[in-house]
Amino acid sequence: MPEPATLIKETDYGTPRAKSAKSVTLTIDGQQVTVPEGTSIMRAAAELGTMVPKLCATDSIEAFGSCRLCVIEIEGRGGTPAACTTPVAPGIVVKTQTPRLMQIRRGVMELYISDHPLDCLTCAANGDCELQDMAGAVGLREVRYGYDGANHVFAKRGGEVNVEWRPKDESNPYFTFEPSKCIVCSRCVRACEEVQGTFALTISGRGFDSRVSPGMDEVFLSSECVSCGACVQACPTATLIESSIVDIGQPEHSLVTTCAYCGVGCSFKAEMRGDEVVRMVPYKDGGANEGHSCVKGRFAFGYATHKDRVLTPMIRERISDPWQVVSWDEAINYAAKRLKDTQRKYGKDSIGGITSSRTTNEEVYAVQRMVRAAFNTNNIDTCARVCHSPTGYGLKQTFGESAGTQDFRSIDVCDVIMVIGANPTDGHPVFGSRMKKRIRAGAKLIVIDPRRTDIVRSPHVEAAYHLQLQPSTNVAIINAIGHVIATENLIDRKFVERRCELSDFARWEEFIKRPENSPEALEPITGVPAEMVRGAARLYATGGNAAIYYGLGVTEHSQGSTMVMAMANIAMATGNIGREGVGVNPLRGQNNVQGSCDMGSFPHEFPGYRHVANVEARTQFEREWKVELSGEPGLRIPNMFDAASDGVFKGLFIQGEDIAQSDPNTHHVEHALSAMDIVIVQDLFLNETAAFAHVFLPGTSFLEKDGTFTNAERRINRVRKVMREKQGMAEWEVVCRLATAMGYPMNYNSASEIMDEIARLTPTFQGVSYERLDELGSIQWPCNDEHPEGTPVMHVDEFTRGKGRFMLTAFVPTAERTNRSFPLILTTGRILAHYNVGAQTRRTDNVVWHPEDILEIHPHDAEVRGIGTGMKVSLASRVGATTLTAVVSDRMPQGVVYTTFHHPVTGANVITTDNSDWATNCPEYKVTAVQVTISNAPSEWQEEQRVRTMANKRIVKDVTLEAAK
């Protein structure tokens, strides 16, 4: 019989782990223990298994020493010092339990309990309350102090209003704050400061008047709180507690799984009652997040059980027809027949597929195998095409591997952090918190971004340089930095001579030293003062360990691939590759962008980035899959759309991707989808793309998946199924059944079987298996005989390609230009509360913070147009127009406007154009010439979208559909 599921409880050692290489041996309660120098006596005792009572201490934050419950005795020293703040010393003898200590601790606990509600049986924290536990641990049996005096417990005292009492704050949709239960241990305040770095909480007042205060004594929702949950996790009582615990009760079992939002890949304990998720708790042993979380991963999982989820397969003859609910067999057979009919009529390359960066590696692998083997075409692409395909190209050309170089922990020893085209506090908030912590510890920050993001200046964090360049001039600014490095003799020539191709370096050095690449020559183009560029370049080259972290503000440009290579050039030139604290690191936008690329989702590459024309690789897959495969690259997503509009590409399988909302030039995408004979959507919801589909195959949420995700640091994490599939079938199983119905038998018994096949065929995954992942927790590829436990830092002794390759990176201005009709530049990004196209987060309470997309516009640009905050405006480009609400903001430079794309009704991509990266066709989302004018009505497209959305939700259950002709 399987072992019964239990609630995973991690040990709280009271204080953080010391990092010293020196060891200290001491005696605690008669037992010797050896620990790193700097370890607290509390932690040393915990490592022996002795848990010293505590309330203000927890191992995610530094020791504070305020509760006085952890007092100890040390032979030869007077007094009773706090175990949390007292470091170990060689040879000392410590006692953690004596009659004297027992008396002190009981006295302290009496004082706490005398000003605390005694409603334990009805309290939501009953069974999970440290105050309750500590009362038992110290043997508290009575409280000699009554409630007659001053207290914070009751709303009234002696018939009068109690001025010390505060009402419960339920403003935040995810947790409650009940001040009457607060013991003022400051753990929440310190977690907000040390772990999250927001500084939203403080202790106001002094002495008996001390209390936790969000912001300026505001409610949580109105304060600067970002709802990461660190304070809730740190709270030892029910003062701060999840609303779901209040509503459902304490969980009774848990499983460790991986968040399905951004590319950080946080590990969580899904804590359950039966098959209901009570809460998601960040896992302390998670390699990527180490016990921290953001509002999305921690709280925004309600979409998995949202009423909008479609749980039954549906089909229809024409996209104007209502949906008809059918069985799985009917849907799969109908889809297969229409796909085969289309191929018979238009040829085998008339159909294709798109994989998702939100599904597991195993599900992605199954889809690309189906397309290559069952469809018999290489027309397979992924949504990574529209975000990080330039990363794959640029890093492959220079370093030899299509992935970032470091693990997230590497930033802890970084001295100079360069953030380019990324907004980590919003887009990758857990890593953003870690970055801010390192900056507070002394690292210098350089930000290259048109927008003044929060990382530029926030509490106790300020960039040494903010190069606020004009959109589309990334390559120019990095070339200018390279020019300074080369002309001021800041090149690490020993590294270059040892590690790089010298002929390529010589060509690059001659190119980059040219006067046209100087900061002064490029200042009119970038808009950045030359002296600022020179200062940033000198800091990057001479400031110690320097690391580059970048996002879609780098890749989503016409020169995205050039920019990635330019960043690699300056990293190699300064020797900032191949050790901790350095590197070139893409911050991936979705949970499995890296994995979807690794799994062979590009039309020219098999899993492991091996070209389809490579006979050896192709033969290996043909032998495993028992089918002849094409050696010709297939169509990329933009090519599929063009071919569909031309009438030669007629069928598409779309896995977990809303291309009608996320891809550029929405009119073109909609026209292409409308022109197809068969569109199959596999997803959770009837999204915008489903309006153009003929078959809908319901998908599974991450809570129902068994598999793996690969995050931005190449970390392969297990995704464990915490509840059964609500629609009855794993997504990879649906894909296998569709492939089989098309005449290609494809079968797996489990997701682990798929991973075993991946490991057989993909050199970088050679040593990966579920058993190995369960043993190690996670693995960063490459994992093979040479690196059996994975590779946290890449290119240590040599580059994957052997020698690093410098590439020439001439700046070429974008074809997208402003003019009198479209005088402004639109750039886009994300906001903390939402994720991607918002399909998941819009179906949670995160909409409280961001109910609609807004347009940020500079005060000067707003004034000349008569625009004020809150006004409706028309945003128009050469290809389309939409209407949204304006917010006047100086975050953007004059001439640049900014919006997000989380709400389909906004239609941000109605505005964006077909311009794309020269090497990969990654769309140029970040540069669109626009005009902004006052409006009083939705745009024509928005009216069409409203009507289409209503029509898309028409479902009938009693109509028989005729077979496809």
Image: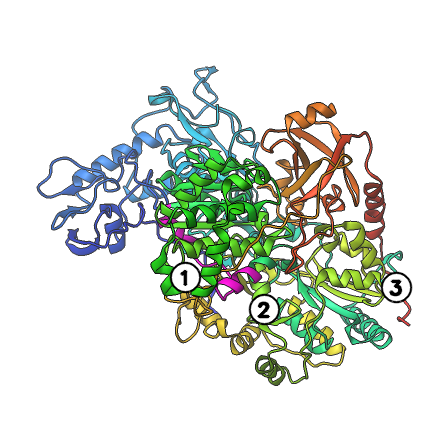
Where 928 falls versus 1 (above or below)? above
Q: Which mark is residue 317?
A: 3
Q: Earlier in the sequence, mark 3 or mark 1?
A: 3
Q: Which residue is mark 2?
A: 599
Q: Is residue 749 left or right of residue 781?
A: right
Q: Earlier in the sequence, mark 2 or mark 1?
A: 2
Q: Secondary structure at mark 1?
A: loop
388 or 147: nearer the viewer:
388
Residue at left 47%, top 71%? Answer: 768
Q: Which residues are magenta?
A: 393-415
Could you tell me residue 814's position as x and y percent? Answer: 66, 48
Q: Using a 10 Å C-alpha cutoff, classify the residue at mark 2 as few (fewer than 14 neighbours), some (14 to 19) or many (20 or more).
A: many
Q: Earlier in the sequence, mark 3 or mark 2?
A: 3
Could you tell me residue 319's position as x and y percent? Answer: 86, 58
Q: CA distance from mark 3 to mark 2?
A: 33 Å
Q: Secondary structure at mark 2?
A: loop
